[in-house]
Amino acid sequence: MGHGLMENRHGLLVDACLTEASGYAERVAALTMIEPFTERTQAITLGADKAYDTRTSSKICGR
């Protein structure tokens, strides 16, 4: 599966990766792609479809 991390303001592709399809591939790819941005002092906003709204994903992202 192909995954992309997009910058929201201008719609630019920031990161991309490929994974094998599984029940967790999308969430694992998303967490891997946002990891470089976790050390920022300013908060960031993430948007995702409803499939990402799980207890584990929410807990890891700090929601």
Image (cartoon, helix red, strand yellow):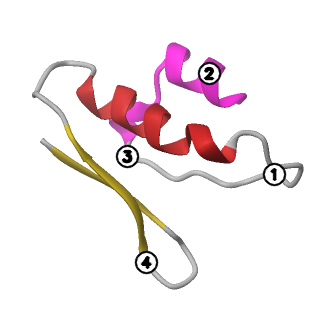
Q: Earlier in the sequence, mark 4 or mark 3?
A: 4
Q: Are marks 1 and 3 in contact (CB under 8 Å)?
A: no
Q: How far from the left and from the top, in percent, is residue 27?
A: 37, 29
Instruction: Establish if 52 lies above or below 56.
Output: below
Residue type for callout 1: Ala
The alpha-carbon separation of the residues under discs 1 and 3 comes to 20 Å
Closer-to-camera residue (2/59): 2
Disc marking residue 12: 4
> Callout 2: 10 Å neighbours few (<14), some, many (20+)?
few
In this rendering, position of residue 25 left or right of residue 52: left
Identify the residue position indicated by label 1 in the image.
Answer: 43
Q: Nearer the viewer, mark 2 or mark 4?
A: 4
Identify the residue position indicated by label 2 in the image.
Answer: 60
| Residue at the image point whose x is 71% and y is 39% from the top | 38
> Callout 3: 10 Å neighbours few (<14), some, many (20+)?
few
The alpha-carbon separation of the residues under discs 4 and 1 comes to 19 Å
The alpha-carbon separation of the residues under discs 2 and 3 comes to 16 Å
Instruction: Establish if 33 lies above or below 6.
Output: above
Q: Nearer the viewer, mark 2 or mark 3?
A: 2
Q: Which residues are magenta?
A: 50-63
| Residue at the image point whose x is 54% and y is 15% from the top | 55
Identify the residue position indicated by label 3 in the image.
Answer: 49
Q: How far from the left and from the top, in percent, is residue 53?
A: 46, 30
Residue type for callout 3: Asp
Which secondary structure type mostly characterizes the magenta part of the structure?
helix
Q: Earlier in the sequence, mark 2 or mark 4?
A: 4
Residue type for callout 2: Ile
